[in-house]
C-alpha cells in the first residue's frame, strides 16, 4: 500500500524505522552487497520501470542535447530538512498553514535563471515525457495554467533516503542532475522500496512519484559537482480545489459533511 496521507493529496511522513541506518553514505558496491540491483543507463534510451503487473512506477526518460547549468547560493540557504544544500523554488504552491495558493516569492532570481535556454529545454522535455508516459495524469492545461514548482540545488554530495511528502502522491516528479561527474561510478539514483540503483547521467530525466517512493542518490566523487533541477507539484493545490477552493479548516467549518472520512 502506498504511504499516502489523509485525503490522498499528500504522503505520510517517514517513520523512524524507514530511515534507520539508511542515512549512511553508501557506494554502489555497498548497495549491491545489500541486495540492490544495478541498472545501467546511458541517459538517452527510454526505459520504463514496472512492477509484476506491468504498472510503471518510474520512467528513465531521455535528455536534451544542450543540458547545462550552474548556480550559486549564500550559506544561509544551504541548511534544511533535506540536507546541507540550497534550493530555489518557483511556481504555484499550497501548504504549511497557507490560507490560499500562492506563488513562490523568488521571482528576481528564478525568473533570470529559468529564462536561460538550458532550462527552457529541460522544462519542455519534461512536459513531452510526462504526456507520453502518463497521458491520463497530464491534463490538457494551457501553459499559463500549469502549476509545477522547480527546485534548483547547487553542488551537493548526496541526499539521504526520503519521500517528498508534500508533493502530489499520484503525480510525477521530474528529476534532472546537472554538473560534472562520472555517472558510471557515482551519482546514481537509489530507489529503496524496490531495491534498485540506477545510473543517472548529467542532463538525463527520470520521472517518479517522489511522494510515495523513498529515494536518494549516491554521493559523487571528490572534485566532482552534481546539481539537481527538479519539477514537482504541491498536493495541497489539488486538495484546495477539491475542497471547493477552501482550506481544510474552512471546509470543516462551512461544509463538515464533505470532510474526508
Image (cartoon, rainbow, N blue to C red):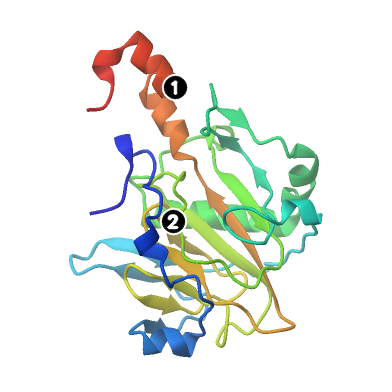
Residue 184 visible in the shown view = yes
Q: Residue furthest left?
A: 53
Q: Local crowd at mark 2 within 10 Å, few (<14), some, or many (≥20)?
A: many
* Left or right of residue 68: residue 165: left
Residue 67, percent across and down? 67, 67
Question: Which of the two residues, 215 or 139, is positioned nearer the viewer here?
Answer: 215
Q: Quadrant of residue 256?
A: top left
Which residue is rendered at x = 51% and y = 33% of the image?
A: 95
Q: Earlier in the sequence, mark 2 or mark 1?
A: 2
Q: Quadrant of residue 190?
A: bottom left
Residue 61 visible in the shown view = no
Q: Given contact means CB atoms under 8 Å apart, are the residues at marks 2 and 1 in contact?
A: no
- Badge 1 marks a residue whose secondary structure is loop
Q: Quadrant of residue 59?
A: bottom left
Which residue is rendered at x = 64% and y = 57% of the image?
A: 121
Q: Which mark is residue 125?
A: none
Q: Quadrant of the C terminus?
A: top left
Q: CA distance from mark 2 to mark 1?
A: 24 Å
Which residue is rendered at x = 49% and y = 68% of the image?
A: 216
Residue 151, percent across and down? 63, 52
Q: Which mark is residue 163?
A: 2
Q: Local crowd at mark 1 within 10 Å, few (<14), some, or many (≥20)?
A: many
Q: Quadrant of the N terminus?
A: bottom left
Which residue is rendered at x = 55% and y = 58% of the image?
A: 125
Q: Residue furthest top?
A: 254
The relative height of residue 64 versus residue 8 in the rendered view (above or below) is below
Residue pointed to by mark 1: 247
Residue 102, percent across and down? 60, 28
The relative height of residue 31 versus residue 110 in the rendered view (above or below) is below
- Badge 2 marks a residue whose secondary structure is loop
Question: Which of the two residues, 245 or 160, is positioned nearer the viewer here?
Answer: 160
User: How many numbered marks have been drawn onto this rendered protein structure?
Assistant: 2
Amino acid at each position: 500500500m502506498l504511504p499516502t496521507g489523509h485525503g490522498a493529496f499528500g504522503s505520510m511522513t517517514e517513520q523512524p524505522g524507514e530511515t534507520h541506518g539508511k542515512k549512511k553514505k553508501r557506494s554502489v558496491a555497498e548497495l549491491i552487497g545489500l541486495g540492490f540491483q544495478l541498472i545501467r543507463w546511458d541517459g538517452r534510451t527510454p526505459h520504463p520501470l514496472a512492477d509484476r503487473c506491468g504498472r510503471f512506477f518510474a520512467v528513465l526518460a531521455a535528455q536534451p542535447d544542450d543540458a547545462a547549468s550552474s548556480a550559486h547560493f549564500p550559506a544561509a540557504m544551504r541548511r534544511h530538512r533535506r540536507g546541507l544544500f540550497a534550493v530555489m523554488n518557483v511556481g504555484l504552491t499550497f501548504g504549511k498553514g497557507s490560507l490560499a495558493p500562492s506563488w513562490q516569492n523568488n521571482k528576481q532570481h528564478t525568473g533570470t535563471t529559468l529564462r536561460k535556454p538550458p532550462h527552457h529545454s529541460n522544462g519542455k522535455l519534461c512536459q513531452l515525457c510526462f504526456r507520453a508516459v502518463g497521458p491520463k495524469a497530464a491534463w490538457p492545461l494551457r501553459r499559463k495554467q500549469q502549476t509545477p514548482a522547480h527546485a534548483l540545488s547547487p553542488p551537493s554530495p548526496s541526499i539521504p533516503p526520503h519521500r517528498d511528502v508534500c508533493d502530489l502522491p499520484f503525480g510525477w516528479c521530474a528529476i534532472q542532475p546537472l554538473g560534472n561527474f562520472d555517472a558510471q561510478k557515482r551519482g546514481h539514483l537509489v530507489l529503496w522500496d524496490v531495491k534498485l540503483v540506477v545510473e543517472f547521467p548529467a542532463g538525463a530525466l527520470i520521472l517518479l512519484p517522489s511522494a510515495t517512493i523513498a529515494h536518494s542518490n549516491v554521493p559523487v566523487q571528490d572534485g566532482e559537482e552534481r546539481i539537481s533541477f527538479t519539477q514537482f507539484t504541491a498536493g495541497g493545490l489539488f486538495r484546495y480545489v477539491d475542497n471547493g477552493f477552501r482550506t481544510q479548516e474552512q471546509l470543516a467549518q462551512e461544509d463538515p459533511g464533505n470532510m474526508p472520512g
